[in-house]
Image (cartoon, rainbow, N blue to C red):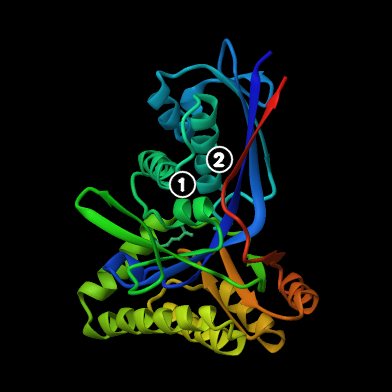
Amino acid sequence: MTDSITASAPGKFVILGEHAVVYGKPAIALAINRRLSLSVTKCTEFRLNDEPADVNSSPHLKNILSRYDMVPVSVRSESRIPAGSGLGSSAALSVAFAAAMRAVEGMSLVPEEIAFEAFEAEYSAQGRGSPMDTSASTHGMGVALNVPGGKPLWEMEKNGRSWNVVGIDVPKMTFVIGYTGIRASTGPLVEKVRKYKDGNRFAADIVDDIGRVTLEGMDAILRNDAVRLGGLMTEDHKLLSILGVSCRELNRLVDASLPHSYGAKLTGSGGGGSMVALTDDPEKVSDAILSRGGMPFVVKTGVEGVTVSARRE
Ligand code: PMV
């Protein structure tokens, strides 16, 4: 008999602060009620969803397995987080696997260690990134980077950069994510903002404004003030548009959502990917997004982070 470990980790979206966070400004990500779960069992060869697999084709899993001398495991996965839509599916995979492997090896499930190992896996697979996604998926609720206040969670460092991550108690709120169907890589968009900012004093002011809006947004979340938070989201979308990271499709979905929302904005790196609207009327917003060619997902915040359970097979 072997122990099968099941770990479940939530997806996330960035509610405020993307792009400006690259320059040390605050950013906030919220965990959502769409989760990825993995069952992991020790085995004689590496298997993915009951088929023998090459671990080199799963760089996130490989990075985590390298902590355990590449011990062969069988991994079954099930995900309700759409891949490539900016909802943190790869971070949830890394977090769930990091937690599951610690349990498989009988190690303690320290959230800081899980978040760190998952961040290392993401960083090695993507060659960049901040610990925002993996921290949100590990901790659940919400996390903020580069803010004063909040509940201190952990500090992470990589290649001379450091991030101070705090936890935020997030109320249950309803958002609709609208996926444009366009996959856009983060790297070129971050580079575009860097070039604009380096050559233009005005762009640096916009980055400062995003920082201010994000700090006000943290206060609005803590006070459960949807009207204020929505207004700040819309303001942030305008600032991100000026920075050049929105696109026609995102603007169309944001515009269509606004009449039925407290506010709406692109989320994540932009250029495609997804937008998010804060609303009490998710059906109307979903219909509006569908009618403009987007793919809507209703999500709720205020959810728990990674969980682990064991079963004897
Ligand atoms: O696309 P996401 O959800 O991983 O967010 C990217 C956020 C950026 O600020 C654009 C980049 C970064 O590494 O923080």
Quick one: SS at disc 2? helix
Callout 2 crowding tier (Cα within 10 Å): few <14, some 14–19, many ≥20: many
- Rendered view: 30 above or below 261: above
From the viewer's perspective, tell me whether residue 191 is left or right of residue 174. Answer: left
Q: Quadrant of residue 261?
A: bottom right
Residue 103 in the image, given as x and y percentages of width and height? 53, 30
Q: Amino acid at mark 2?
A: Ala
Residue 3 in the image, given as x and y percentages of width and height? 64, 22
Q: Cβ of disc 1 within 8 Å of ligand 1?
A: no
Q: Is residue 271 visible?
A: no
Residue 293 in the image, given as x and y percentages of width and height? 71, 68
**Disc on res. 309:** none
From the viewer's perspective, tell me whether residue 84 is left or right of residue 312. Answer: left
Residue 297 vs residue 70, the one in the foreground = 70
- Rendered view: 127 above or below 15: above
Image quadrant holding the C terminus, namely top right
Quick one: SS at disc 1? helix
Q: Dot 1 corresponds to which residue?
A: 111
